[in-house]
Image (cartoon, rainbow, N blue to C red):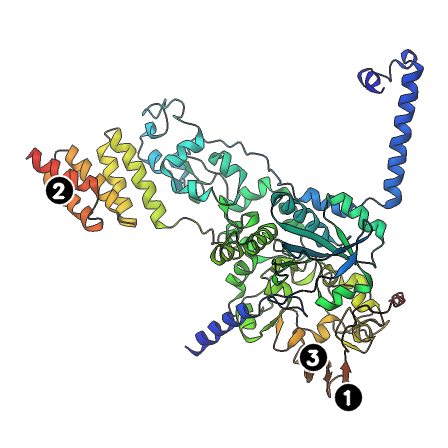
Amino acid sequence: MRRLAYLAAGVLLWSLTALAFANIPVGTVVENVLLPALAGGEQHLLSDTNVSVFIFLKPGQEHSNQVMVQITACEKEMAGKPVHWCAVVSDRVPQADVEAQIQASGFTMPVLIDRGDALYGRFGVVLHPVVGITDQDRRLVAYQPFAKVNYRAFIRAQIRHALKEITDEELAAVLKPTAAVLSGEASVARRYFRLAEKQFQSTNYGQALSNLKKSLDKHPTAEACSLQGRILAAQGKSVEAVAVFEAALKLDPQDATALEGIKACKAAK
Amino acid sequence: MIGPIAKKNTMSQPSTIPDANRDARLKRIVICAAAGLILLTLGYPATAAAAKKSEATPVPKMRKNDLTPIPDLQKPVSAHSPYQDGDCSVCHQRKDRSDPGMINKPVNELCLDCHDDFAKVMARKSSHVPAKLNCVSCHNPHNARQPHLLVEESETLCLSCHAAISNLVTNAKVKHDALGVDHKCANCHNPHAASVEHLLIRLPFDLCVGCHGKDGVKDHDGKVLANMKQLLTDNSHQHGPVADKDCSACHTPHGGDNFRLLTKEYPAQFYSPYDPKLYALCFDCHEESMVKDPKTTTLTKFRNGDQNLHFVHVNKDERGRTCRACHEVHAARQIHQIRDAVPYGRTGYLLKVNFTQSPTGGSCDRTCHVMRSYTNSVVPLVPPKTEAVPPKSP
């Protein structure tokens, strides 16, 4: 019991210690600094009116290169939405290298230069590459470090959540997708049912009943019981058919096939 | 005017090319050469190109299998119910086993008639191309020598198309035993479709702790591994990729050349001369300058004023402390995953680190050294430019 309580507390703590920049927790309003742009002139890190996505990159680094490709695809997917995009690179990386990497990855968003890693230090970036997302009020709403799996889906969902296009539950469903476990007994039962349906249509009653039994043994449903009743009725076994239809109604009192089947059996008598 | 040249076989008919076209051709060659030179000068960023290339979904070749029913004498392990029932007309034109005729519908349409739950399965975000196009790439619709009507043993079947993984698994110095037990590839992958990329049944972390969240799990060489679930419950300060549930950031699940299936090099020892190559794994995400620059006011909080204490500890020609000397890799009780204690001497006696955090820094007491504290002053808005000092050679 105590072990379980510890485990639950651990999970809770885990969710509470949400990922964030070392110096800027999620929920903080981020200062809209002006930085020199790679293309010339100066540009703000954030938009004062739109959702902003900024990416700390290290051109030449394997993960950053992958992110450049993924973010470019993400930007294209979200074209037309009120999102301000930019990347931040350190002035340590030679400008020619940055430009070459950008060209190779098809990266189109503005690239801002972080002189002396000042912004890196203020945010407490620690890792490269990392994405920050702020809302219309410049509040940091998401922090997404690199992930080898489902990365673009994570980023897209975080942006859509910031744009209020998806709910908390929908975001959670992306961040923690449902497990793709192999089919359970209900699915196998359904297959036997579908096969029995086909065999019933081709008047192969014996095998249809045999497969229905397998289906019902695995996962009893009103639908399967009703089909069993129809087969028995077709074989002229009205008494057994009514019993099976009644079993179907116990599983689903509204099952139309069973209700009609009972009526038909009684009328045939 | 380069059009006419392109249409002609200029190699076999050089004398027929008018001078004007020859000029155009020369111009084109010069432009191409210049472009090539520019690319060479800038250094073509192969890594970015490779990253772009790796985005493309690999399409393994479709298998063509012999789908003839296996005679009962050969003792098939699994059989398809319609075949077992002897009613060929469920799928074929006729009931007659000796002459069933063609199938009634395209293969997958026919399968999904009964296996209709698969319509929902195949709608998942990440789907397996052969499963989407042709169920009989992997399954024999009559019977098979393998469970689930598989045409071959499951791992052999997967690796027959996934040659790169096959090579990796075969040649890896460090093996991952999960690949060869229970459901083999299907321990982690759903061969039909999944909501996670690479057909993973769950996100990497959730898959990994499925096995590594238990006591007594051993690696390929028999070494007992930590119960990660318990370790993370007991230690709230987690490494970024762990907190982000991305084990694959540092580990390669199919096998590899580095210990603990690490994707890149990472020093296994406590002491090591500083060589950036040894830290390839760490520098995949962490800024190398954090260890290279003797002075900084931005790259790390582990500094005394502007004296970079990461540099002081790590960047040494001899007996440089490796990352593991002070940090736990997965999680720790203390901030920055600082270890409670470090192994000391041949017996591995645990020497307490006695790290204490303060609002402006911290201290380590009676550990590798006498009590020493550091203060990282507030980061200035525009730090003074410091001359980068080249790293010491190892």
Chain hosting mark 3: B
- The residue positioned 45% from the left and 43% from the top of the image is B146
Q: Residues within 10 Å of mark 3 (few under 14, many from 20)?
A: few
Q: Residue placed farthest to the left in the image? A: A269
Q: Amino acid at mark 2?
A: Val
**Most foreground residue, B142 or A209:** A209
Chain hosting mark 1: B
Q: Residues within 10 Å of mark 1 (few under 14, many from 20)?
A: few
Q: Secondary structure at mark 3?
A: strand
The mark found on residue B370 in the picture is 1
Q: Position of residue B257 (x, y in %)?
A: 70, 56
Mark nearer the N terminus (1 vs 3)? 3
Question: Quick check: A36 left or right of B200?
Answer: right
Are marks 2 and 3 in one subunit?
no
Total marks in image: 3
Image: A122 above or below A232 = below
- Residue B7, located in which quarter of the rendered image? top right
**Most foreground residue, B386 or B290:** B386
Q: Position of residue B244 (x, y in %)?
A: 60, 62
Q: Position of residue A192 (x, y in %)?
A: 31, 41
Q: Quadrant of the N terminus of chain A?
A: bottom left
Q: Quadrant of the C terminus of chain A?
A: top left
The residue labelled by disc 3 is: B343
The mark found on residue A226 in the picture is none
Image: B10 above or below B53 = above
Question: Quick check: B32 left or right of B360?
Answer: right
Q: Nearer the viewer, mark 2 or mark 3?
A: 2
The residue labelled by disc 2 is: A242
